[in-house]
Image (tube, helix red, strand yellow):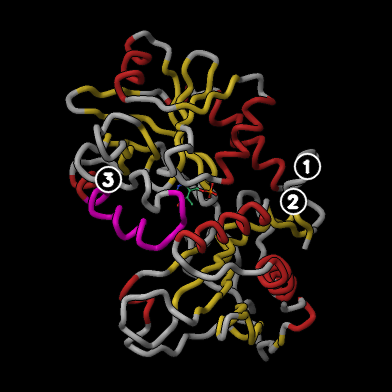
Amino acid sequence: MVAAADIKITKVETSKLRGMTLENLPFGRYFTDHMLEADYEDGEWKNVEIKPYQPLLMEPSLAALHYGQAIFEGIKAYKDVDGNASIFRPYDNFKRFNLSAERMCMPTVPEEIFIEGMRKLIAIDKNWIPSLPEHSLYIRPFMFSSDPVIGVKPSDTYKFIIILSPTGPYYAAPMKIYVEEIYTRAAPGGVGFSKNAGNYGGSMLATAMAKKQGYDQVLWTDAFEHKYLQEVGTMNVFFIIGNKAITPSLEDGTILAGVTRDSAMVVLKEMGIEVVETKITIDELIDAHKAGLLTEVFGTGTAAVISMIKELKYKDYVMHFDTDKSAVAPELKSRLNAIRDGKTADIHGWLLKI
Ligand SMILES: *Cc1c(COP(=O)(O)O)cnc(C)c1O
């Protein structure tokens, strides 16, 4: 096993940060000075290295490009008011990453590399964490198969990489959502619960079609009847019905278990709202809307934290939500942000100090 101390470190001579402000950077376009890279070969992880951010050299036969053994995570680090840096719930992403790895027939990554490597990397690029409100350092760990062989089989070699991107604020305008009835994101027995690259590739056409009709994203439904609600775009979804927050349950393996989803469930309970994880159909949702009980719909995910939904369209039935009157989603967002920014006590132990 690789100890954190075994990470080879090569630093840049001159930081790209000089002359750059970390204000209002768009999501995912700018990367810090360094990256972490590790190789899986002969059944073990080796060559763990932090080095200047740089292009990868690869053969056109690289297995991941052909057969899609590729997984990733999305995590954020923050600076609190005193300038101390922390990562939000990285152990949850670490566990999920290895679940994704197992489902995609890939090796798991040890904590020494995933967590300790990430901490070391962020410590080196600490000046890249924006300290402005709602800004953060987005952390992108990923792994892909790297055999230069186009035979269909699990690769013998893999690369694990972490890159860092300063970002924010992520302004998520209230969204218009189209309830999808043709395309499917995930089916039981499939890979919907794993954060693998192909899930995103497979979802883009449905989103593009929804955009053509003036919608921002789709609300995915189950593969068999297109009735059970799953996720909104690449976010988990919550429905506020009466004094309950309802979110689709995970047992079918068709929903990605979001860390923000889990955090939202904890904080919603603290707000005095009953949280129910259950199967819910579009018909039940429409009934709640007709009865005047469905007051808010929102998505949760690391990038935007909470995204409010102002319109939901199913066949000819359109539901409108006045997001200016939303009470739950804004309160939830501000409570989650306060924990991340260190403005309220981290009573759940969600922050890992750098
Ligand atoms: C990443 C992701 C989410 C959100 O997960 P978080 O851990 O909250 O960022 C939700 N759904 C899908 C499909 C995702 O890929």
Q: Is residue 33 visible?
A: no
Q: Amino acid at mark 1?
A: Asp
Q: Earlier in the sequence, mark 2 or mark 1?
A: 1
Give the residue type that dot 3 points to.
Answer: Thr
Q: Secondary structure at mark 2?
A: strand
In the figure, residue 227 lies in which quadrant?
top left
Separation (CA) of disc 2 from disc 3: 35 Å
Question: Any mark on residue 184, and which?
Answer: 3
Residue at point 50%, 41% (across, down): 300
Between 121 and 112, the residue placed more toward the observer is: 112
Dot 2 and dot 1 residues touching (CB under 8 Å): yes
Q: CA distance from mark 1 to mark 3?
A: 38 Å
Q: Residue drawn 40% across and 43% down? A: 254
Relative to 118, is 319 on the left or the right? left
In the image, residue 79 above or below residue 318: below
Q: Position of residue 278 (x, y in %)?
A: 47, 26
Q: Which residue is mark 2?
A: 351
Frontmost of labels 1 and 3 is: 3
Q: At label 2, which amino acid type do we have?
A: Leu
Magenta residues, start to end? 193-208
Q: Residues within 10 Å of mark 3 (few under 14, many from 20)?
A: some
Task: Tell me the residue that label 1 is attached to.
Answer: 346
**Dominant secondary structure of the residues highlighted in magenta in the image:** helix
What SS does tag 1 mark?
A: loop
